[in-house]
Image: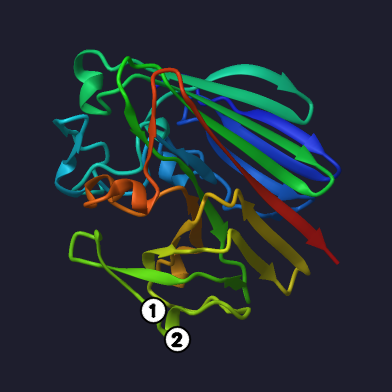
Amino acid sequence: MASLDEVHLAHAGFRLSVCPALGGAITRFALDDFDLLRPWDGSEQVRRTSCFVLAPYSNRVGGGMFQADGESHRLRLNSAEHALPIHGVGWKRSWTLAAQEADRLVLTLLHRAEGDARQDWPFSFELEHELGLDEQGAWLRLALINRSERVMPAGLGWHPYFPRHAGVTLRFAAEQVWLSDDQQLPSEAVDIPPRWDFRQTRALGEPELDHCFAGWDVTATLQWPTAGVRLELEADPSMAHLVVYTPPAAQGFFAVEPVSHRNNALNAPDPAKHGVLYLQPGERLERRCRLRVTRR
């Protein structure tokens, strides 16, 4: 693997670090001495970082294949921890640092659908990820451009890991949640049961979530009362799906993931209904996300 050197940004007490070679992942986001994302453990595992990009699809692809443009496309496994292709291509590749200032940087990635790389995604594309800091926290802009000569199904998102500091609370509103089968693929959309209802601020607890919420209102609020820290995750209105993952508390983290389409949407009867977009050659899909922080 290429050198796991980090690039650092700073502004108004905020610090943000990125490792271009390790999936272009964020490795730390902190306000003064308080970690707002789970800090990277220094390993070569992208899943042990603070946040990574999901593109050109998010979450799992059922059966490791999908239909597009009248063809069937099979994807190879991309994680030893999962039995299905997961989270797209970007998190498994080294990115290029294209621009850097004191409080802003740009990472890029070009995927050419040639040779074995076609098994990761059969369409060529380019990614551009701009990350910055201001007085309110961090802002992210992610662009996906179809560089193939065919129409390409597309989706994107972010996979931030939040630290499970004592007393952490969560609030978000959504219309439905997708139940999952034994492969963690969505099976049925239902009204949100009380144990998964976070419309009112409540302690995270142990909800045993690894599910996709539909009709999310594109704002999630996290609070760490002991530290007096509040973080609002805000995404573009079109990012109407939210994946929430809550492993046992002893693991020390949880994930709240804004995404453009539901899990396994590529295999839905009508993928577009569940957020998949179809990009013409050269067309660009761009979405934004903000981590707005206050501290008393």
223 with respect to 125 (left or right) = right
Q: Is residue 211 above or below residue 37?
A: below
Q: Residue drawn 49% across and 40% down?
A: 52
Q: Is residue 95 above or below residue 262?
A: above
Residue, disc 1:
191
Rendered image quadrant of residue 181: bottom left
Q: Which image quarter is the C terminus in?
A: bottom right
Rendered image quadrant of residue 26: top right
**34 and 95: which one is in front?**
95
Residue, disc 2:
194
**145 and 110: which one is in front?**
145
**What label sits on residue 253 in the rendered view?**
none
Q: Give percent across and percent down for residue 203.
A: 58, 79
**For the residue carrying disc 1, how many other residues have a C-alpha within 10 Å: few (<14), some (14-19), or many (20+)?**
few
**For the residue carrying disc 2, how many other residues have a C-alpha within 10 Å: few (<14), some (14-19), or many (20+)?**
few
In 3D space, how far apart are the residues under numbered discs 2 and 1 (Cα atoms)?
A: 9 Å
Q: Residue drawn 50% across and 69% down?
A: 174
Q: Give percent across and percent down for residue 20.
A: 53, 25
**199 and 238: which one is in front?**
238
**203 and 141: which one is in front?**
141
Q: Which image quarter is the N terminus in?
A: top left
Mark 2 and mark 1 residues within 8 Å of each other at the beta carbon: no
Q: Is residue 85 above or below residue 110?
A: below
Tag nearer the camera, 2 or 1: 1
The amino acid at mark 1 is: Asp
183 with respect to 252 (left or right) = left
How many labels sit on residues? Answer: 2
Please tell me whether mark 1 sits on a helix, a strand or a loop. Answer: loop
The amino acid at mark 2 is: Pro
247 with respect to 296 (left or right) = left
106 with respect to 94 (left or right) = right
